[in-house]
Image: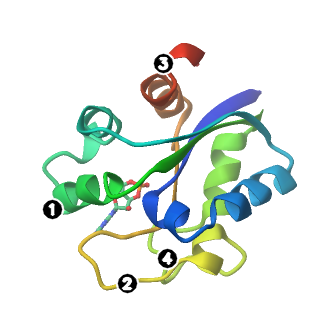
Amino acid sequence: DVQRSLVLVKPDGVRRGLSGEILRRIEAKGYTLVAVELRDATPEILAAHYAEHEGKPFYAPLVEFMLSGPVLAVVVEGHRCIEGFRSLAGATDPTVAAPGTIRGDLGRDWGLAVQQNLVHGSDSPESAEREIGIWFADLGA
Ligand code: CMP
């Protein structure tokens, strides 16, 4: 079944000039880029996007980090692309993410309060629909 996933290149990825490399890996895997937009997150967008993490110890630093610079919001399309992008991204913690993955090849621990792990990818079809609606109100999902 054709799926869509909401991918974000987080501010650390944009700052480090890795947006192109990350898009390259998504396209090389064979997925289609449906929408790509460089934009500044807002507290309102992040409150909706990270609603499930509200109250966790890393929530405030996470929001602060996500507001620290522009993010590249991307809608990716393809059969099983939700699972497929999460596999491309690697484990949440970039220190232990497998080599060959975006986080494993390009990320590391910088000793900060929040894991700066370069990318976000939706974790289920329900999350994808919700997140695409948050970042691309005009796309539907
Ligand atoms: P993401 O998949 O975008 O969802 C929540 C984010 O919070 C996650 O990526 C990391 O950037 C961050 N995060 C998750 N767990 C932790 C943790 N234990 N400590 C610090 N940051 C975390």
Q: CA distance from mark 1 to mark 4?
A: 19 Å
Marks 2 and 3: CB-CB under 8 Å?
no
The residue that disc 2 covers is: 110
Which quadrant: the N terminus? top right
Q: Position of residue 29 (x, y in %)?
A: 83, 54
Q: Position of residue 97 (x, y in %)?
A: 56, 76
Residue located beneath label 4 in the image:
94
Q: Residue at x 33, y 58 (%)?
A: 68
Q: Residue flagged by tag 2: what amino acid is it?
A: Trp
The residue to which callout 3 is attached is 137
Residue under the point 31% across and 42% down: 50
**Does any portion of residue 140 appear in the rendered image?**
no
Query: Left or right: 79 with respect to 95?
Result: right
**Is 100 drawn above or below residue 25 in the view shown?**
below
Give the SS element for disc 4: loop
Q: Is mark 1 within 8 Å of ligand 1?
A: yes
Instruction: Give the spatial CA distance, label 4 vs label 2.
Output: 10 Å
